[in-house]
Image (cartoon, rainbow, N blue to C red):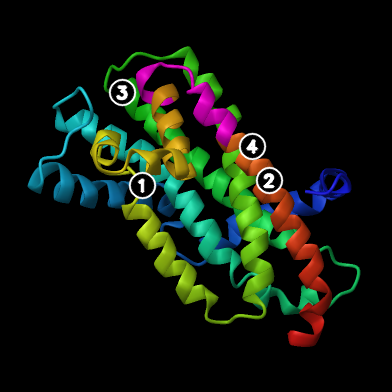
Amino acid sequence: MTLSAPRNLFQRRSLIAALVRRDLLGRYRGSVFGAVWAVAEPLALLGVYTLVFGVLFRLRSDGDSSLLSYSLEVFCGIVPWLMISESLNRSVTVMLESVSLVKKVIFPGEVLPLKIVLAGAFQQLIGTAVLLLALIVLGKPIHFTWLYLPLLLVPQILIVAGLAWLLAGAGVFLRDLRQIVSLLTLCWLFLTPVFYPEETVAKIFPLWLTLNPAAALIHNYRNALLRGLPPDAGKYLSTLALGIAVSALGYWWFQKTKRAFVDVL
């Protein structure tokens, strides 16, 4: 990200907040259950993954053979993964869906992919609150490491925002990108230890746990929220460095390509 980028985005914080609010309100407008879907979607996926992998395939968490612990581990992985997957898939078409705004010369188009990422982060916080409430109801200990949650969101938002800017800029010119990203995020899900233990990957391809930023992010969420352990410093710093690099590249790419948006759109 260029040196002026954080300042520009901060100066537009009111606009970004308004767009995020409108995105969240419009997401469930007209639906019967409204914001309940923010909780229902991860719970539904939790039920499916627990049934398939926990009951049928009998997968369990590392060091704990109970189905309940496995379900909590899966839910802790699903919540951040949904934010990553949804943000990337929506960012591909966000410029095409906002042509009237994009064609206004004075409108800062870079806030459109960012509002999707921040709206997804808010949805993630709702899911995380459900997880923490479930832990309390089930009599699990309350850990001070829960306070690391805002810190853990920083590299995730940076990585996803950078990728969102890259995809939003490329999506204007490559209309097949939506299908490509949908397929890639599905493959990425199955290559990330969301519903199976990290040891499963470590035995086959240990280097992948280092190369896969989603695996590092989910590992630290599980440490802080479920195990009462501080985030792994190495994994955190590597994802933070990656986030800074990817967000800088994504912002630069978006600023470079947006000059041609009006001609293409």
Query: In this rendering, which labeled residue sits more in front, label 1 or label 2?
Result: 2
Q: Is 114 on the left or on the right of 8, as rendered?
A: left
Q: Is residue 93 visible?
A: yes
Q: Count every numbered label the image shows and give the total.
A: 4
Q: Main secondary structure of the magenta part?
A: helix
Q: Quadrant of the C terminus?
A: bottom right
Examine the rendered structure and indicate whether residue 172 appears above or below residue 166.
Answer: below
Label 4 crowding class (10 Å Cα cut-off): few <14, some 14-19, many 20+?
some
Q: In which image quadrant can residue 32 be found?
A: bottom left
* Sequence-wise first label, 1 or 4: 1
Q: Give the label on residue 192, or none.
A: 1
What amino acid is found at the position of numbered circle 3 in the picture? Val
Q: Give the label on residue 223, or none.
A: none
* Range covered by the magenta-colored residues: 225-238
C-alpha gap between disc 1 and disc 3: 29 Å
Q: Secondary structure at mark 1?
A: loop
What amino acid is found at the position of numbered circle 2 in the picture? Ala
C-alpha gap between disc 1 and disc 2: 22 Å
